[in-house]
């Protein structure tokens, strides 16, 4: 009798390709990744399906604007919380 069992898994071909590239870069097999997840699943007896947070259009525009400002050096930096809070208090006057 074999020491291993085979699991047939249906998945998106693009997902499989991406996963194979990452696993190869890390020097491990997809089987090792899936076995690790199965071990975690059985140990924790739970599964988490996380949905990545995607900002709405308005927030995405604000983030893009902020990123451009940061890249241009247009931001304030403070040595202490006290200085930051003083700056904010002065701005709100």
Image: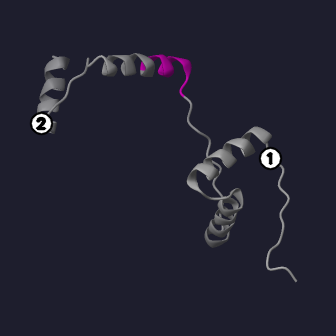
Mark 2–mark 1 Cα distance, whole angstroms, equals: 53 Å
Q: Residue at x 15, y 24 (%)?
A: 87
Question: Which residue is denoted by mark 1 in the rendering?
Answer: 11
**Left or right: 25 with respect to 1?**
left
Q: Residue at x 48, y 16 (%)?
A: 61
Q: Quadrant of residue 83?
A: top left
Q: Quadrant of the N terminus?
A: bottom right
Q: Is disc 2 surrounded by few (<14), some (14 to 19) or many (20+) residues within 10 Å?
A: few
Q: Check residue 86 for magenta coloring.
A: no
For numbered disc 2, what is the local secondary structure? helix
Numbered badge on residue 82: 2
Q: Is residue 48 above or below residue 80?
A: below
Q: Read off the magenta span.
A: 55-62
Q: Residue at x 50, y 17 (%)?
A: 58
Q: Is disc 1 surrounded by few (<14), some (14 to 19) or many (20+) residues within 10 Å?
A: few
**Left or right: 84 with respect to 59?**
left
For numbered disc 1, what is the local secondary structure? loop
Counting from the top left corner in percent of width and height, residue 69 is at: 33, 17
**Image colouring:** one colour
Q: Nearer the viewer, residue 78 or 35?
A: 35
Q: Quadrant of the C terminus?
A: top left
Q: Nearer the viewer, residue 57 or 14?
A: 14
Main secondary structure found in the magenta portion: helix
Q: Is residue 78 above or below residue 69?
A: below
Q: Is residue 44 above or below residue 83?
A: below
Numbered badge on residue 48: none
């Amino acid at each position: 009798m074999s020491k291993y069992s085979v699991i047939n898994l249906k998945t998106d071909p693009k997902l499989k390709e991406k996963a194979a590239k990452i696993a190869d870069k890390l020097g491990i097999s997809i089987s090792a990744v899936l076995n690790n997840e199965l071990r975690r699943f059985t140990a924790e007896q739970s599964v988490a399906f996380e949905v990545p947070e995607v900002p709405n259009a308005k927030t995405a525009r604000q983030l893009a604007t902020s990123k451009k400002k940061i890249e241009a050096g247009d931001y304030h930096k403070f040595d202490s919380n006290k200085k930051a809070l003083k700056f904010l208090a002065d701005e709100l006057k």
